Amino acid sequence: MERRRWLLLLAVLACLFGCSAGRELRFKHKIHNHSPVYNHTLATILVRYASTVYLSDLTELFSWTCDECNGLIKDFQMIELIVDIQHCLQAYVGVATDPNAIIIAFRGTQEHSIQNWIEDLFWKQLDIDYPGMPDAMVHHGFYSAYHNTTIRPGILNAVARAKEFYGDIGIIVTGHSMGGAMASFCALDLRVNQKENNVQVMTFGQPRIGNAIFATYYSKLVPKSIRITNGNDVVPHLPPYYTHFPQKTYHHFPREVWLYNIGLGSLVYKVEKICDASGEDPTCSRSVKGNSISDHLVYFGVDLMAKTWRPCKIVMGPGLLEHGRTDLEGNFVLSRDLATPVLKLKTRPDARGKPL
């Protein structure tokens, strides 16, 4: 019986190997109209933006000269780099030619110990009503990190400036961990309050941010949203989802893409599974315990963390603050003059020179 089971497993693996032709496997459910389309290449680009925003050397980040920046993500122009010292937050806005869009990236948690931050999430309750959405409740900390700090005005100012010089191009918002939560609130803000129609979201290892009613509103307003989760990453399991109280508990918005490995011995295949439209597909990341910090810190082979876990450490070269403005709390924004755009974006023949 045991021998038969092993033969069956070998046959399945052989079939998978033949179908994959040595590449990553992509499993998916039927996708309904208006659902986001998962793009593997785009994911491997955006994960690098989500990684670079962790950099503490602001000179390299603002000038886009770091190893993680110019060497791997070409044709990107930084517009604004926002650093909220008071709340230990960091984000940037820029314009890229590939993808042809405004890129907004949020940094994840910078706590002394990520373990302590994860343990704290176990006890977070739904504690604030989302404005204009009856019965929709969200996580006060994640909501406030975007809405009640210097991050939001800096982001909105940069988006307005980018559109003034580059035309009505699309917006892609990304982030990892807590940065993914802030990215989601930012995208919703852009759609609802700023009336932006072309907003796309792709986050990595994002925690839950609201209840099921909020998730329903969100999926209708920001349908081009994808949350990528990796293996046994613990953070997408937090704050906890309680099956017996679906309306009162935290609930992910769709659509999840779950990365995991299958294999036998040394034969390992990477799978990218496009999950169902529930936001809580029991066959995706919810099918595992979700107890790994290491799976949280690396996506697509890219490190998503600061080099040290000392909070809010930043490094700036002489003269960098000449590009910025500072408030009374020491928070600051570094801005690039866009009077002469350096990037040539793709345009339609009938768009009178405006970018796509």
Image (cartoon, helix red, strand yellow):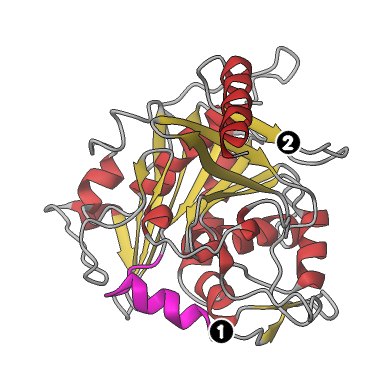
Q: Amino acid at mark 2?
A: Lys
Badge 1 is on which residue? 124
Task: Please tell me whether mark 2 sits on a helix, a strand or a loop.
Answer: strand
User: Residue 193 at x, y = what percent?
Assistant: 72, 62
Residue 121 is one of the magenta-drawn residues: yes
Image quadrant holding the C terminus, namely: top right
Number of numbered discs:
2
How packed mark 1 is, by other alpha carbons closer than 10 Å (few <14, some 14-19, many 20 or more), is some
Residue 108 x/y as whole percent: 42, 62
- Label 1 sits on what residue type? Lys
Residue 173 to residue 31: above or below: below
Q: Which residues are magenta?
A: 109-122
Would you name the residue on which mark 2 appears? 28
Q: Is residue 146 visible?
A: yes
Q: Residue at x 64, y 60 (%)?
A: 286
Residue 335 rendering spot, x and y as whole percentages: 37, 51
Q: Locate the N terminus and report the quarter of the image it occupies.
A: top right
Query: Toward which corner of the image does residue 245 lie, by quadrant?
Result: bottom right
Residue 284 pos. (x, y %): 66, 51
Residues at marks 1 and 2 touching, judged by CB atoms closer than 8 Å: no
> Which residue sits at x=56%, y=71%?
238
